[in-house]
Image (spheres, helix red, strand yellow):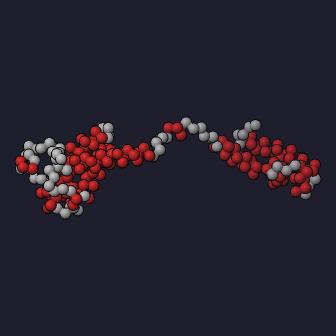
Amino acid sequence: MRISTYPPPSAEGAGLMGKPRLSHWIRRVRPDDDLVVSALYREYHGPLLAFVVRLTGGDRQWAEDVVQETMIRAWRSAERLDPASVSLMPWLATVARRIVIDDRRRRDARPQESGDGPLESVPVPDEMEGLLHQVLVSDALRALSPAHREILNETILRDRSVNDAAEALGIPVGTVKSRVYYAVRALRVALEERGVTA
């Protein structure tokens, strides 16, 4: 099995040419030490980011997130990393590739977000006009005499016939008819005073 030397050796050289192997800092630090993350980030951030940008189709923000998650996983796995390895890039690239694949699967499993566009064109009935009419009618009804309010309440709001209203109120049918007539006229005047016309 051939060991990858990606990223390419630096001017100092790798391994035999004077560059300290990973074992130099993996053996010296505890897995929870910030030095592990700093050394990983310093050595591999640039090449790993370039690799992940290609995996994400040029989405740099997503690539940055993937690189950060990869570094966190490397930090958590520091005690399991091979200190004799010349480069961790193959391991980091594999982890990053799996993160990108998992992200894609999650995105595909979720329904597509639609945004607010379609909702803006859905017609919504304007209930404000109806509410305004209710307020004006209520106000106009309060302007009527108690007898007129009572007769309109029985005949119109409770939807009773003239005979049923007469029986409920204990007044003659003829009185009910005349009160309804005058109450409707008074209500029309009260509504016109408030700007409502038929």
User: Residue at 74% across / 37% down in the picture?
Assistant: 197
Residue 146 can be seen in this image: yes
| Residue under the point 76% across and 37% down | 198
Does residue 145 appear anywhere in the picture? Answer: no
In the rendered image, the residue lying farthest to the front is 1
* Residue at left offset 17%, top offset 49%: 87
Q: Is residue 44 above or below residue 121?
A: below
Report the front residue among 27 and 44. Answer: 27
Residue 16 in the image: x percent, y percent? 6, 49
Give coordinates of residue 50: x percent, y percent.
24, 41
Is 23 on the left-hand or right-hand side of 172? Answer: left
Q: On the rendered structure, is 28 left or right of 52?
A: left
Residue 168 is situated, as x and y percent measured from the top left of the image, at 88, 57
Residue 110 locus on image (x, y percent): 45, 46
Tally of numbered tags: 0
Q: Is residue 153 left or right of residue 17?
A: right
Residue nearest the viewer, comparing 34 with 155: 34
Quarter assignment of residue 62: top left
- Residue sitting at 25 percent across and 44 percent down? 49
Residue placed farthest to the left in the image? 17
Depth check: give the residue in front, 28 or 95: 95
